Each structure stands twice: as C-alpha cells, then as structure tokens.
Amino acid sequence: MNGYTEDKDAYLKRLRRIEGQIRGIARMVEEDKYCIDVLTQVAAANKALQAVALGLLDEHLAHCVTEAAAQGGDVADTKIAEASAAIARLVRS
C-alpha cells in the first residue's frame, strides 16, 4: 500500500483541478491573452503541482521511508536514497 492511498481521492481531485488550470492556460494562448496574464496562470499551476508533490513526499516519508527504516538494512538504504533523489529533483525544479 502506498503512503498516499488514504488521501488518494483528495490528490485526484487536486490533480483534476490542475488539469483544468492547464486547459485554461492553453485556451488563453489560443485566444492571444496578455502574456503576463498567461504567465501568472502558469505560475499558479506550478505552485499547485508543487503542493501536490510536497504532499506526496510527506506521505512517502511518513509511510514508506519510516516503514523501511524500521526494517533496516538494504531496504532502508534504498528508500532513503530514493527519497533524497526525489527531494533533489523537487529542489531543482
């Protein structure tokens, strides 16, 4: 079971809302809306995706990594390395 399973419906709802935002941005471009207005919406969509990513990361750390750390050994090392790599990707983006 994944760490986010209990909140799966909430994540899906948020992602659908973001999907709508992206469609709205595409529509803005099609309608030749003002550049700054489009950029503002892109920034809002990015923030919304970051919020989802941070929530998933938090769930992963609280569930998957904590469970693996309790087991110890190679499983723990692997999960910690995965989490570190995910954090690095989020920080770079």
Image: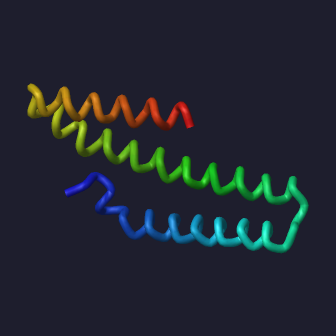
Q: Residue at 17% across / 30% down in the picture?
A: 76
Left or right placement of residue 44 versus residue 58 in this view: right
Q: Residue at 53% across / 71% down in the picture?
A: 16
Residue 33 image-quadrant placement:
bottom right
Q: Quadrant of the C terminus?
A: top right
Q: Quadrant of the N terminus?
A: bottom left
Residue 70 image-quadrant placement:
top left
Q: Find the residue positioned furthest to the right.
A: 34
Residue 7 to residue 55: above or below: below
Q: Position of residue 80 (x, y in %)?
A: 26, 30
Q: Nearer the viewer, residue 72 or 45?
A: 45
Q: Residue at 55% across / 47% down in the picture?
A: 50
Left or right placement of residue 47 versus residue 28 in this view: left
Q: Position of residue 27 (x, y in %)?
A: 75, 73
Residue 68 to residue 9: above or below: above
Colour treatment of the image: rainbow
Q: Nearer the viewer, residue 35 or 43?
A: 35
Left or right placement of residue 46 versus residue 26 in this view: left
Q: Position of residue 39 (x, y in %)?
A: 79, 53
Q: Residue at 63% across / 49% down in the picture?
A: 47
Q: Position of residue 67 (x, y in %)?
A: 17, 40
Residue 74 to residue 51: above or below: above
Q: Exactly how many numbered labels are in the figure?
A: 0
